[in-house]
Image (tube, rainbow, N blue to C red):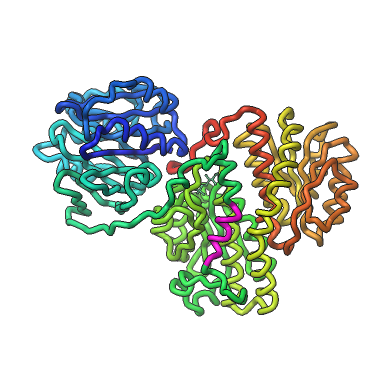
Amino acid sequence: MCGIIGYLGYRKAMPILLEGLFAQEYRGYDSAGVAVLEDGTLRVEHSVGKIALLEQKIGDNIGEGVIGIGHTRWATHGRPTEDNCHPHTDCHGNIAVVHNGIIENYLELREWLQNQGHTFTSQTDTEVLPHLLEELYQTDLYQAMSDAVARLRGAYACVAVSSFDPRRLVAARKDSPLVIGVGEGEYFLASDIAALIRYTRNVIILENGDIAVVDDHGIKITNQGQPVQRKMVYVDWDKEAAEKAGFPHFMLKEIHEQPAVMAKTMRGRISDDLEQVLLPEMDAAFSDEFLKGVNKLVIVACGTSYHAGLVAKQSIERLLRLPVEVDIASEYRYRKPLVDEHALVVVVSQSGETADTLAALRESQYNGAKVIAICNVMDSSIAREADCVLYTWAGVEIAVASTKAYVTQLMLLYMLTFYLGQRLQILSGDYLHHLLQELDELPDKIAAQLPTIEETTREWAEYIKDYDDAFFIGRGLDHSVALEGALKLKEISYIHAEAYAAGELKHGTIALIEPGIPVIALATQQFLLEKSISNIVELKARDAHIFGIAFEQTQSMAKVTDGCIYLPQTDDLLAPIITVVPLQLLAYYAADYRGCEIDQPRNLAKSVTVE
Ligand code: F6R
């Protein structure tokens, strides 16, 4: 998705802006640009494609300007061309603007501005902004911005710089994230903290409706015309978190971080004696009376986060016997969902900014339901609007393909399930203790097994890399994880992959099985093992090449597969947390063998802030 960076200070702005753009590359983009004030004139540079091309274009000519803005664009309105790149300028090149989000009424604004004599050079919605500022500017860029945003419908995070007001940046935010980094005599504006932690760790998070002015006198923030104070937070992410730490790709680094972030997600949430789940956020948000009145849970999310929700449905229904619906956010929001004050809605989002998930949250609240958000990004829009937030603490996830966020989502969904079981007095003390003990041991078990899993999946990937199609099968919880395995393989290696409930194949899909075709068969659920093995045998009889994934006690898999990874034993209920790891590594190595751009797969963005 698009990324914003702005700088005002005493250092040359150009390298800082480029650095800020590089730090946001992971968000996905198709073009980039910068605007720097040099000798009272705006210098604007654009480039389609990689940020390195923009850097090359600028070369040594970084200029002397100490104030400027930059942007990485992911095309929505208008193709990825130089004309459509941000920053956009007004008719006379005096005002430049970068913008994330969508201005919904841009066509009507554009027509009005054209009637006022403005000439447009792009097809973007953003270009109405500099023209609107030009039209409304009298003596003060802040006032022009206030008047301009009052006319906008939609979502925006924008930053403007102008030769009329040469020591000033003006920013506005609604439904799209924007932060101010505060340094010594210098300021940074960014859509993403990762873009500025290299320079400062003191950050102000702007809220919806805020307009901020940054100049030599400091920062002034207003909301609806009134001055407001926003607290400065210290961001303690270590610098390493934004780098690859020696791994060739962020995705591999993030897969290896999983044991650590799983442990981090549990920290302080399980009592030392492993008897209780502690979620004070839940205690504070919901009374016993409310929880007892809940007649169903509804989990809403997109992509990988949706797959985490599918796992939670099975574990919640199995343990709590409470009905759970799981829905894709883009479907849920438009189907007049049957939720009311007796439903408890859980939205799951790594970024906390996914437009459809945010809309689903609002739709649920509109219908009277309370919403719990499971988020990774602190103070993200979803986190701020939910009735209760549980953070996954996976740290910054840079690779577009989600891995560590997914396992921490699973951890937290399990803890939420156990918490509800304990609070509603459904789970017995002994069983809860057993599950918490198993959960607690998982990070170490995974860390110990990772080298072996990695070696085997690399071998499997060498086989799979030459195929155009692959199948993933499993029953029950294994099926939910199979869906995630297929998504990972598709999105980074571009191999077509499908996941099926193992018992469903013979109702049609088995017709696609040809000799040699790779099938990844998950068989961790003991009570379904015989059934799963029968399904594997059906495929083997048609000469499919079977890669099995099972627990170490299930040695019978050796007889029916062409190779099997045996995972350290845990409770069947928790299997998804561990079975997903070989699937992530398999996708990673298949993509690596095929020479794909693993961290930034084609056509994908890290955070989908548009519908
Ligand atoms: C796939 C992936 C996506 C996201 C989806 C939702 O690897 O990362 O499918 O899971 O776009 O994003 P969040 O969780 O940020 O709402």
Where is residue 283? Give x, y as percent.
Answer: 47, 74
Query: The N terminus lies in which quarter of the figure?
Result: top left
Where is residue 448? Give x, y as percent.
Answer: 69, 54
Q: Which residues are magenta?
A: 258-267
Magenta span: predominant SS is helix
User: Seen in the image, is 87 located left or right of residue 256?
Assistant: left
**Image quadrant assignment for residue 93:** top left
Asked whether the viewer can see residue 424, the reply is: yes
Q: Residue at x 20, y 45 (%)?
A: 185
Q: What is the residue that sits farthest to the left in this orientation?
A: 139
Question: Does residue 280 lie above or below 242 as drawn?
Answer: below
User: Seen in the image, is 541 located left or right of residue 79?
Assistant: right
Where is residue 525? Give x, y as percent.
Answer: 77, 58
Question: Does residue 280 lie above or below 457 as drawn?
Answer: below
Asked if residue 261 lies in the magenta stretch, the reply is yes
Asked if residue 8 lies in the magenta stretch, the reply is no
Along the line of sight, the residue nearer the viewer: 142 or 317 = 142
Question: Does residue 586 lie above or below 287 as drawn?
Answer: above
**Image quadrant assignment for residue 76:** top left
Question: Does residue 403 lie above or below 419 as drawn?
Answer: above
User: Seen in the image, is 454 located left or right of residue 73?
Assistant: right
Where is residue 425? Give x, y as percent.
Answer: 61, 79
Asked whether the viewer can see residue 504, the reply is: no
Q: Residue at x 20, y 42 (%)?
A: 145
